[in-house]
């Protein structure tokens, strides 16, 4: 078994679109770093499962299902997280519906154990 800091670990390459989005996020966050990748997700698995299930179910409600799904999406922004990977650090932000960045929740330095292929 290889150690977590093994440089031979294989990772999926970062797509060009994701790299461009990361660059835009870096500019909007006013960071002096090179954007590598960005991820939009919920804050934990339970939240993902609950909100995702409810959104899938309301799609089948006639006439207003799409409006309910939109309302759920807007009301759950508090639980969204944006993970921004730069050449030096990994930033975690709370998503905010009208501007980025929201509140910065964490900063982790990149090191040999974090593999992001370009």
Image (cartoon, helix red, strand yellow):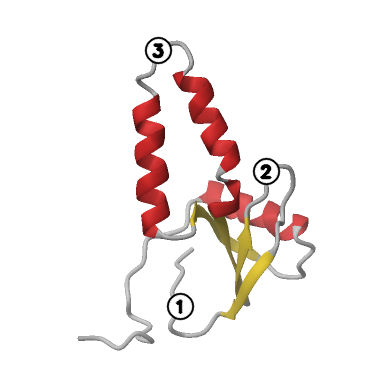
> What separation in Å lies between label 3 and label 2 (alpha carbons)?
27 Å
The residue to which callout 2 is attached is: 97
Residue 11 falls in image quadrant: bottom left
Q: Position of residue 29 (x, y in %)?
A: 75, 60
Q: Position of residue 69 (x, y in %)?
A: 49, 29
Q: Nearer the viewer, residue 48 or 82?
A: 48
Q: Which mark is residue 98?
A: none
Decide if residue 78 is on the left or right side of residue 112.
right
The answer to whether residue 7 is above or below residue 33 is below
Which residue is outermost to the top?
Answer: 63
Asked if the residue at tag 2 contacts the one at tag 3, i.e. Cβ–Cβ closer than 8 Å, the answer is no
Q: Residue at x 61, y 73 (%)?
A: 106
The residue to which callout 3 is attached is: 62
Q: Position of residue 6 (x, y in %)?
A: 35, 86
Earlier sequence position, callout 2 versus callout 1: 2
The answer to whether residue 51 is above or below residue 92 is above
Residue 85 falls in image quadrant: bottom right
The answer to whether residue 26 is above or below residue 62 is below
Earlier sequence position, callout 3 versus callout 2: 3
> What separation in Å lies between label 3 and label 1 (alpha carbons)?
46 Å
> Which numbered mark, 2 or 1, is in the foreground of this view?
2
The answer to whether residue 57 is above or below residue 87 is above
Circle 2 SS class: loop
Circle 1 SS class: loop
The residue to which callout 1 is attached is: 114
Earlier sequence position, callout 3 versus callout 1: 3
Q: Nearer the viewer, residue 98 or 31?
A: 98
Asked if the residue at tag 1 contacts the one at tag 2, i.e. Cβ–Cβ closer than 8 Å, the answer is no
């Amino acid at each position: 078994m290889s150690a977590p800091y093994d440089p031979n670990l294989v990772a999926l390459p970062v797509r060009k679109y994701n790299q461009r989005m990361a660059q835009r996020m870096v500019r909007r966050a006013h960071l002096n770093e090179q954007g590598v990748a960005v991820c939009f997700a919920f804050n934990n698995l339970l939240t993902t499962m609950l909100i995702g299930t409810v959104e899938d179910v309301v799609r089948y409600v006639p006439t207003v299902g799409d409006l309910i799904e939109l309302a759920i999406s807007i009301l759950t922004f508090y639980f969204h997280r944006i993970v921004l990977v730069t050449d030096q650090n990994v930033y975690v932000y709370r998503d905010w519906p009208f501007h980025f960045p929201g509140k910065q929740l964490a900063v982790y330095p990149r090191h040999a154990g974090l593999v992001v292929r370009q």
